Each structure stands twice: as C-alpha cells, then as structure tokens.
Amino acid sequence: MPASPDLLAALTDRLGAAHVLTAPDETEPYLVETRGLHRGRALAVARPADTAEVAAVVALCAEAGVPVVAQGGNTGLVSGGVPQGGLVLSLARLDRVRAIDATNATITVEAGVPLAEVQAAADRAGMLFPLSLASEGSCRIGGNLATNAGGTAVLAYGNARDLVLGLEVVLADGRVWNGLKALRKDNAGYDLKHLFVGSEGTLGIITAAVLKLFPKPASRGVGFVGLADPTAALALFERLRDRAGHDLTAFEVIPPFGLEIVLRHTPGATAPLSGPHGTYALVEFSSTRVDAPAGEALAAALQEALEAGLVEDAALGASEAQNQALWALRENLSEVQRREGGSIKHDVSVPLSRLPEFLATATRACEAAMPGLRVCAFGHFGDGNIHFNLSQPVGMDRAAFLGEWSRFNRIVHDVVHALGGSIAAEHGIGLIKRDELVRYADPVALDLMRRLKTALDPHGLLNPGKVVVPEGDAGPPPLPSG
Amino acid sequence: MPASPDLLAALTDRLGAAHVLTAPDETEPYLVETRGLHRGRALAVARPADTAEVAAVVALCAEAGVPVVAQGGNTGLVSGGVPQGGLVLSLARLDRVRAIDATNATITVEAGVPLAEVQAAADRAGMLFPLSLASEGSCRIGGNLATNAGGTAVLAYGNARDLVLGLEVVLADGRVWNGLKALRKDNAGYDLKHLFVGSEGTLGIITAAVLKLFPKPASRGVGFVGLADPTAALALFERLRDRAGHDLTAFEVIPPFGLEIVLRHTPGATAPLSGPHGTYALVEFSSTRVDAPAGEALAAALQEALEAGLVEDAALGASEAQNQALWALRENLSEVQRREGGSIKHDVSVPLSRLPEFLATATRACEAAMPGLRVCAFGHFGDGNIHFNLSQPVGMDRAAFLGEWSRFNRIVHDVVHALGGSIAAEHGIGLIKRDELVRYADPVALDLMRRLKTALDPHGLLNPGKVVVPEGDAGPPPLPSG
C-alpha cells in the first residue's frame, strides 16, 4: 500500500510533526520484533499523546481505509505488533497513572505505562500489582492486557485478564468506549472488557484500564528443589498447593539442561544443590499474615516432602538476597538460551495432570526428529504452562536449524492438541501462530471468532492478518523466521 | 404466538412425549419467577436429556423461527428466565458430573447439576468449589454461569465467571461449540467463554463447563462485629484485608434494622452482641495452612481493632456450630424481609471507597421519598455490593408499595450511577432491569452489546427481550411487579 500524503498530512496536523515518524531510522524500532525474527513495513508511526488523539488517529485511518497496528513496548513474542503495511500507532505517550484508590484496591493507568511503573506506583501506595514477567521494564501495560500476559505470578493472582476491572478502548471507527469501572461485581449487560483483553489489538485499542491491587505479602520463602522427574514435581506441586493454597505463589520448573546453561552463561551463578537431579523446581510461598511467616511454612513443607521421599534435595533462601539469587536462576533461563544458538520456541499449556506425559512424549518426539537437539522445557509448571524450547544441536548452522521451525511446531503442537492443551498459553497468537490456530481450533470456535472480528471491525483495519483472518483469506503469510 | 403443531410434533418425536410439557399444571413452575412477581407464557417446556438433544431442540426452533428461553433452576431474581412466548428449554436433565481431576483442580459438570451438588462432588474429591449463595440447593450451575452469579465467597474466590475454565455451548443455530478446556492459561484466539458467561441465555445456551476447584481450608474463624457506622466498617475491612489478604474470605454487612427483623422472625436466633450498634459486620477468615489457624488470626485482628477504637464490640464463634449460627443471621436476612411486607430491591455495587457515601445518600433520598419506609441495606460489603432493599412502611398496602418500584429504582440507581457504580451487581439484567440498562449504560457500550447480540443470534431467538434489545425495539414491556 503506498503512503497516503493526505492521511500523513492530516495526522501531522493533529499530532504535530514530531509525533508522526516516517524517517527509516526513526521507524525502525517499531518495525522489527524483539528477537529480530521478523521485519514489517508501515506508512508511518503515529505517537498520540492521549485517548482523544488515539481516537482521532483511528478515525482518520478508518476514513482512509488504512490499517492500524497498535504497539506498546513492542516486546511481544509472536510478532503480533509487527506491521504488514498501514500505520503503527504507538501508545507509549499515554503514560499517566490516572488514579490510585488504595481503599478500593485499584489503580487506573493509561496503556503506555511500563509494567514496572505500574508495579512501582502500586508499591508506593502500599499495595501489590502482581503481574510480573521478564520484559517488565520495557513492556507496557496496554500490551500486557491486549495479549493477556501471564508471567510468574499467575498461580496465585491469575493472568492479566484476571487483574482487569475496567477498560477504555478506542474502537475501529474511532469511537471511545469508556468502560473504566472500578467494581468487583458488575453484571450490567455483556462483559465487554474480556472481549478486548487478549485480542491483540484486532478488536479495539486499549487506551486505559482499571486494575486490581492486592495487599503486599508480609513475608516470602523461596526454595530450590531437586526431584527425580516431572511426575515427582507434579506430586510435590499438588501437595504444596493443598497445604498452602493461595500462599503457594510460584512453582516453576527448570530441567537439568536449563540449569546447566544458566550456570554456564551467568557470571557468579552457583549451583544451589550439590548433586544432579532429574528435574528442578523453584518454589515460592508468600503470606500476607504477619502471624504466618511464609519461609517457615515452606521449610516445613519441604522437610515433610523430603521425609516422604518426594523430594531428593532442597535449598532454601536464608535471606532476601538469596531468594533473589534463586529466582535469578529461573529468570535468566530465557536469556541464556540465545547463547546456545538457535532456539525454536513453543509456549504451550496442558492440564496439570497431563504434564509428565506431555513432557515425556514431546521430548521423545523432538529428539527422535533431530539427533543432538537439546530440549529446554521449563516454566510455569503450576499453571500447566511449559516453554517447550528446542536449542539447536551443537555446531549446527543457526539459520538451518530455525528453518525447521514449522516442522517442530507440528510435532509439539500435535502432542499438545492430543492432550487437550493450548498451542498459545501466554504469548498469544499474533502472526506466527495464526495459521496454527486455524489448524487446531474447533471450527465452530473459529467461526465465532470471525463473527466477532466482523462485528467489531467490519472493514478489517485493526491489526489485520493477526490472530484471526477471514475464511479463505490467509492474508500475507507469516514471515519466515530467520 | 400460536403454538406450532409441527414444532411440537418434531420436539415430541425427538425428546419423547414425557419431555415436552404443554399441560398448564406441568408448565406452571417454568412460567413464574421465584418470588411470584412475574408470570410468563410459553408454547411448551422442552426437557432435553443431553447436549445433542439441546442442540436438536434449538435447531428445530431456529428452523421454525420460535424463541428459546433456557432455564436452570428458575431461581433468578431479575425475571431473566420468564418466557414471553416461545419455548422454555429446561437444562434440568443435563445433571451429570462428567469428570473430576483433583490434580488439575477441575470439575466438568453439565448445566443442570444443582450448585449444591457441584459443591458436594468437589468435597468428595477433597476439594472446594467455593461458589455459594442462598438458592444453592435449587439453582443449577448452568444458570449460575449464565448469570455470572456472585454470592458470599466472591471476596476471596471471585464471581462465577472467575471459576470457569471452559464451556460447552449450544449456539442460536443449533451448532455446538466445544470449549471444554481445562487450562489455567490459554490465549489461543479470542476468549469466547467470557462472552457467554453472564449473557443470561441471550447469546448461547451453556450445556457444560469446566470449573476450578481449590484446596479445602483447614480452618475458619467467624466474627460478628458491632461498629459505629459504615465508615468504620470500611476502615475495618481495609485493615483486615491488608493484614489477612486472601484469608479474609467474607465481609458482610447487616444494618440494625436487618438484625432486628432476623431476630424477630427466626425462631431460636439470639443477638450475638449485647448493646446496639450503628452497623454490624459478619467477618470470616479461613486458611489452608494448618500452621496458620484462621480463628486465632481473626481474634487477634479484631482485638487489635477494638483497641484501636475501630470496633465497638465483637463476638467470635467458639465452635463450628457457633460459626454457623453467626452466618445464619446473615443468610436469613433475605428470607425474613418477606415477613415485613413488600420489599423493593436493588442489587447494586459501587467502588468500596464510595460505600459510606452511597449508603448515606441513597438512604436519605429514599426515606425522604416515603416517610416510614425502612431501608434494609445489607450484603457483600467487601465486594462493594449492597442489596439496597426497601421494606414497606408498617401498615401500608403491599401492592401499593410495590407499585412504587420504578420510582425507587430511579432514586437509588441515580445515586449508584453518579458514584460510578453498577445497577446490576450480581443478579443480572434479565427483564426487570432491561430498560434501566438502556438508561444508564454508555451508549457506545450498548451499541457494542447489540452488535454482539446480532453477531451471535442474528434472528433474535435466544431469550428475546432480555438484557439487550435492538435499538428502538423495546419488545414487550417488563411485566409490572405485583
């Protein structure tokens, strides 16, 4: 699609020349996804300052028939924010915390506030905003909501979706839906907010939200546990959940290969346990009650599990610094995979009871498909969410390995599908899983999704080609990895 | 609409004559809402046995252009299940628990399972299904989900919506969407389940669901607290929430008039506190951790609040029997209002920080509008959800009082609206608040709702006249109360 001088002039008129970017060096960061896998193209990047300007930009684009791709921090992992033409609309300048109500335990923020800033604002008010994920310093809350982000606090607090009470959304025609309710109970008609959360900018553009806050925990305990295998990890999880309930705030799993590469590539990192184990779990208890310290409860629960033979070994953080060091082993895992060459990624989930079977079956299938391939299956075990990543065989050409992306998707997603799982647990569909969704989704579900898309964005101008595309119209193909 | 012999014959052919009711004495219970306020009319009542039969019934009705009104236990409080013609489709025979997976903490149930049966099945599996409300013995889980029911456990566990992982739904054209996923994280396209939850049978008919289970609490403590006023109650709530977090599992408020009529009409009930107080709170802590007993923590927190002058007096249940007796004071409140004559009801919510202002303003306005009227504002204070009910003046004619329903709606809902609240907190819109929704909803929200209705039920056959009606087409007026 050629640039439209009229549209650019109108945008410049409305936003000021400084906020309509067309120079290649200025637009570059908005065109490439965070891992450099995909590059898009756009007429321009618009940077409106507030909701009224967002609405004006969308209305101008609607009039011109030009697609709009909303972008927050551009940290997504499914190329959902990579434009394939049209205008990039950056929400970055909508960065105000509009209100905090500690009594109501709510915060009202604009879409462009970085997640870490939402956390910090809550903290200053004496409260907790629990959403937490690797990119929290650079991702923005609007993107977190548009993708229904997950992260490390889902076990106790839910996904991003579960933290939303109200939304403000600019619709495809430029109208503004003001749904900024701050209510714990509201059954006044259909729930519209859940339609936009997780729709990846394809049904509307979230400009602000009312989010839930929580009391800050008074204590936490962190343990690093060595176990025989995922079956033992699942048994430990079930035992801890049934004993600690909501106080079990994290249960992450790290495979031996994952621990190995974290220790290899992280300066100063040391192995928390002496011997090797079949798998590892990072476990956290936290408690709001000062009379019920989390660390002691975790120590007692792990001791009991040791005595029951469920756990092979365990190390407990004896200080907050040690707790953070244990967490760092898990958190650095995403980053250090890059150091081992190409990585083919799957963000999947299965019912918790199927986790051991999933891990065994998918690992076996992938290893059989490419000798030397190194499975790095880690993540949010307590949510049934595994980042089933594949590091290339040592010495293989990176590009050649990444060229196998689709073949391994098929292998892994077939296993996931057979176990009643999801091929998109917390990262969304975006561009790279769009055709996988068509393959695996219930046809009735797909039809419903298309009807919703048509009802809310009849001209297909909001982030076209992502998530759901019209039947028989695949749009531009997902860009090849490389 | 006259009965269609063809349709009835086809239904009888498919379901058997025993499950297509047309005799007045058989259809009667399906035509009248639970308080006897409204009576509807229907061609017949169909009682399919399973999802395939539900789909067949809906397909036959779609073909014949006949509306379908889904009904669970017919315990709703907004006449959402009262038919205004068409066919009543009872889900009562879909009453199987399809699966329980204690490891995954999920239960799969059909729509017609009574709520109490879902609770009992969870309990037998050693788990908790927390949804709890007054009609739990007779309401059915499909209705709870279709109305996004609230109840007394929302504070810690959320509304019915928050307890759903997956749904099976029969669509307006008789197709079945199988969305029975049992996953904690699933971002594979738009979230369809949230569209149907709370849509009161107007977008699809829920036939089965996968629900979350939770560990059973190991202990609970229940306290009955006397406070100066709602401002003190709010301060106490905030203090307990910040100290107990998720362990604060209930915070219900009862006004002096409410306590008075519960004691008057409940045989054997005794006042838990000696002196009179400005307002009362029923507070519950519970804990999953055996090392952190809830009763002791509640006692300590209330003692502290007493010493801080926040609380005037408090009684603690010293046994589970006493806990239940304290809870009964709150639970009997709905029932005993009938004994005081006509009651005009408002199920509303506001942000917690606005609760004292709401209660003061709405009470003042109602008392000014009718001398002698007795405000009975009670309920789920910790959720910002008040049942702002009005008992008739002593000696007034009941029907004359109920004739003022709309006038008092206007007074109360205006106050709610001005405070950013909801006119339908947990009971839904149904028939009786349909026109109120049009009055108070953001016009853009209303337009979105209508678009969703058109997208999913283009011929308007699912529970027509409820929740959202086409613009300019009010449908039959909400039946007058009486």
Image: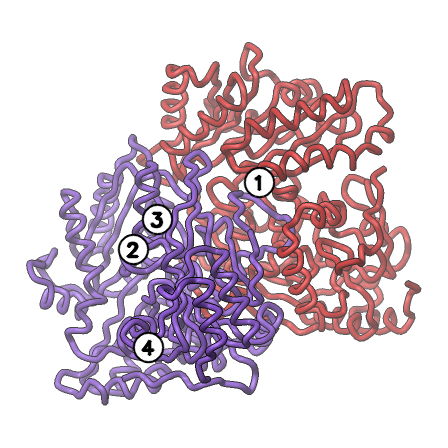
Chain colours: A red, B purple
Q: Secondary structure at mark 4?
A: helix
The residue beneath circle 2 is: B251
Q: Are marks 1 and 2 in contact (CB under 8 Å)?
A: no
The chain under label 3 reads B
Which residue is label 1 attached to?
Answer: A420
Location of residue A455 with respect to B240 vertically, above or below: below
Q: What amino acid is at disc 1?
A: Gly
Mark 4 to mark 3 CA distance (whole Å): 40 Å
Tell me which label, 4 or 2, sits earlier in the chain. 2
Q: Amino acid at mark 2?
A: Phe
Q: Earlier in the sequence, mark 4 or mark 3?
A: 3
Residue A321 visible to an observer of this rendering: no
Q: Quadrant of the C terminus of chain A?
A: top right
Q: Is residue B216 above or below residue B197?
A: above
Q: Chain of mark 4?
A: B
Q: Earlier in the sequence, mark 2 or mark 3?
A: 3
Q: Residue at x 61, y 22 (%)?
A: A255
For label 4, the residue is B361
Task: Say which of marks 4 and 1 sits in front.
Answer: 1
